[in-house]
Amino acid sequence: MPGGVVIAAPASGSGKTTVTQALLRLLTREGRIVAPFKTGPDYIDGAFLRGAAGTGRPCYNLDGFAMRAETLAAAVVAGAQDADLAIIEGVMGLFDGAANGAGSTADLAALLNLPVILVIDAARQSQSVAAIAHGFRSLRQDVTVAGVILNRVASLRHEALLRAALQQIDMPVLAALPTQEDLALPSRHLGLMQAGEHADLDLFLDTAADWLHRHLDRALLEHVLRPLKLQPDATLRPLPPLGQQIAVAQDAAFAFSYPHLLQGWRNQGAELSFFSPLQDEAPAQDCDAIFLPGGYPELQAGRLAGNGTMLQGLRAAAARKAAIYGECGGFMLLGRSLTDAEGQEHAMAGLLPVATSFAQPKRQLGYRRITALADSPLGAKGSRFRGHEFHYSIQTDGDGIMIPLFSTEDATGTVLGTAGCRDGSVFGSYLHLIDRA
């Protein structure tokens, strides 16, 4: 059974993603088989963690709010298969969850009985670090904060002050990491730019691993690891497959597909093929379903609008009644047009009577409780799901009769109205589905 640990922080921006990447790359370079996981619905961090692990294995998301217990257990089994270590990166602060409080990194650590290493941004403080560590260790008896990694340490004197304060509360220090400017990653919206957009990701990861290696107490790390709780008979089946031959869009503009969903479709007998809308590739002609995940089509709107082979392939699939499902960026591609941030309108596939626009961006963010308003390959009318919404574009008036796809509530149960639309076998919305409710 692999050992495991959760890398968490008091708040976003503390450096836990960089530390997790560094740890994954360091252990992988030493010949360890490490399984990466990401807490919550984040797509982008997962791609960096997958690259850091370097084994080609997916980085599975673990979501205590949006996943059923059986789905979460199965995702752990799928991700940890044949690994001897599991490293789970948290989300936001250790105790931060959905609006109703559920699904935090702390909840996940307690469920899996894993220790937490807390990454603390030590800049602009010294002895006060002990109060932060003590509070996080003491808040919940079912969560074990086994040690801290101090980040952005200014000097040896600063490190000595921090260590002395933490020694007073018997808090182990696994590393005191100095500020290193070349380990800053560019961001977009609320997260990092995609791993595939990084000019030299391997160089960055190796630099991060070297940085951690110089300061990490390896014996202490091995001491805090605990065996990962697994349910060997758990099998991923989060959503019904869209068809038996599913063509999945996959490139820099459509990169946001969860590994647990794709593996779940395979587990239920579906065969998956992949195509790149950016490279003007059409979906496989023998597919009976197409999945267009989210991503950043707004950054490539002009190029997508000119990719006739891809657009005609989508239209031909719709004409033969193949199921075509788009989420967020995929939903935008299926619409009549996409207006970019400069106000230029670009024609899209025209398979749904909607138009989307970044001309006046408005952020929509949060977990969603979702109910299907009509039968679809995802389930019968009334089927319930959990998912997530995060986008800046808005849906403008369409050019036809709008048949809503879902009704939605936020995590607390507050009604938000309808979402998405459908036209024949084509359907989509801004929502990212994570699991059945």
Image (spheres, rainbow, N blue to C red):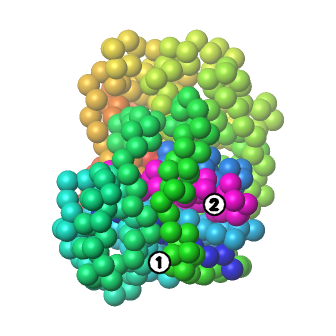
Q: What is the secondary structure assignment of the residue under circle 1?
A: loop
Image height check: is 285 above or below 64? above
Tell me what residue is drawn at x 34 percent, y 25 percent: 358
Which quadrant, please, contains the N terminus?
A: bottom right
Residue 437 numbered tag? none
How busy is the neighbourhood of tag 1: few (under 14 within 10 Å), some, or many (20 plus)?
A: many
- On screen, residue 133 versus residue 303, left or right, reads left
How busy is the neighbourhood of tag 2: few (under 14 within 10 Å), some, or many (20 plus)?
A: some
Image height check: is 398 above or below 144? above
Are discs 1 and 2 less than 8 Å apart at CB?
no
Residue receiving disc 1: 115
Whether residue 427 is visible: no
Whether residue 163 is visible: yes
- On screen, residue 121 versus residue 370, left or right, reads left
Upstream in sequence: badge 1 or badge 2? 2
Would you say residue 360 sits in the magenta stretch?
no
Residue at far front of view: 157
Q: What is the secondary structure assignment of the residue under circle 2?
A: helix
State the image coordinates of residue 383 (x, y, percent, origin top left). Answer: 50, 62
Residue receiving disc 2: 27
State the image coordinates of residue 16 (x, y, percent, origin top left). Answer: 41, 56
State the CA–CA distance, disc 1 to disc 2: 18 Å
Which residues, given as a range, are shown in magenta?
Answer: 12-38
| Of residues 306 and 206, the one drawn nearer to the viewer in this rendering | 206
Tell me what residue is drawn at x 67 percent, y 39 percent: 248
| Of residues 398 and 241, the one drawn nearer to the viewer in this rendering | 241
State the image coordinates of residue 329 (x, y, percent, origin top left). Answer: 48, 34
State the image coordinates of residue 187 (x, y, percent, origin top left). Answer: 39, 36
Tell me what residue is drawn at x 40 percent, y 14 percent: 345
Would you say residue 29 sits in the magenta stretch?
yes
Tell me what residue is drawn at x 73 percent, y 60 percent: 31
